[in-house]
């Protein structure tokens, strides 16, 4: 059986989509081939790495990728995890089902180390909850 292909999109591909990629691989990597990308990619946010490590998932080897790298590929699902990416996401060829889940950007939270990490953990947990609901369908 071929694995379903999933692309998780965000604007910078630095936090939400990266955490989504790591979480979906962890939850159902045997069912899905999972990728993430950004409409304007930047760099992997260290707080995303810390939030994922806190639950035992290592995403240190992941890196930000441009949506343009995936435009000629076919996906079964394209999941946007931020509103701006949902607005600018192009149409993908093939049977790609578009899904949008808007999560707040934890990178805009100001404060000390613990406050910033808490914001990333909260968004990570929200993404995890949404992925579990989706997988149960």
Image (spheres, helix red, strand yellow):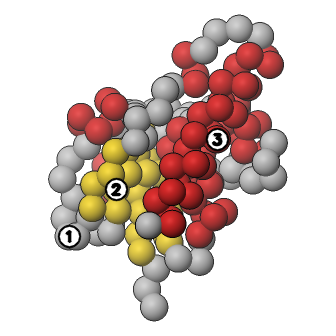
Label 1 Cα crowd, 10 Å radius (few <14 / some 14-19 / many 20+): few
Distance in Å between CA atoms under marks 1 and 2: 11 Å
Residue carrying label 2: 78
Say whether residue 103 is visible: yes
Q: Are marks 1 and 2 in contact (CB under 8 Å)?
A: no
Label 3 Cα crowd, 10 Å radius (few <14 / some 14-19 / many 20+): some
Q: Residue at x 58, y 24 (%)?
A: 106
Give residue 15's quadrant in the image.
Answer: top right
Q: Give the percent coordinates (x, y) of residue 137.
A: 44, 67
Choose the circle earlier in sequence order: 3 or 1. Answer: 1
Q: Are marks 3 and 1 in contact (CB under 8 Å)?
A: no
Give residue 26's quadrant in the image.
Answer: bottom right
Distance in Å between CA atoms under marks 3 and 1: 31 Å
Residue carrying label 1: 94
Q: Nearer the viewer, mark 3 or mark 1?
A: 3
Q: Nearer the viewer, mark 2 or mark 3?
A: 3
Q: Say what secondary structure mark 1 lies in.
A: loop
């Amino acid at each position: 059986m071929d694995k379903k292909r999933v692309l998780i999109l965000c604007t910078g591909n630095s936090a939400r989509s990266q955490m989504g990629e790591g979480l979906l691989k962890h939850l159902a990597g045997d069912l899905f081939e999972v990728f993430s990308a950004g409409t304007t990619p930047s760099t992997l946010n260290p707080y995303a790495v810390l939030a994922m490590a806190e639950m035992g998932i290592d995403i240190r080897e992941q890196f930000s990728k441009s949506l343009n790298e995936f435009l000629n590929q076919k996906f079964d699902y394209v999941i946007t995890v931020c509103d701006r990416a949902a607005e600018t996401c192009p149409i993908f060829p093939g049977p790609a089902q578009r899904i949008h889940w808007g999560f707040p950007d934890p990178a805009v939270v100001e404060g000390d180390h613990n406050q910033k990490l808490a914001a990333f953990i909260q968004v990570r947990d929200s993404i995890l909850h949404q992925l579990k609901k989706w997988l149960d369908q």
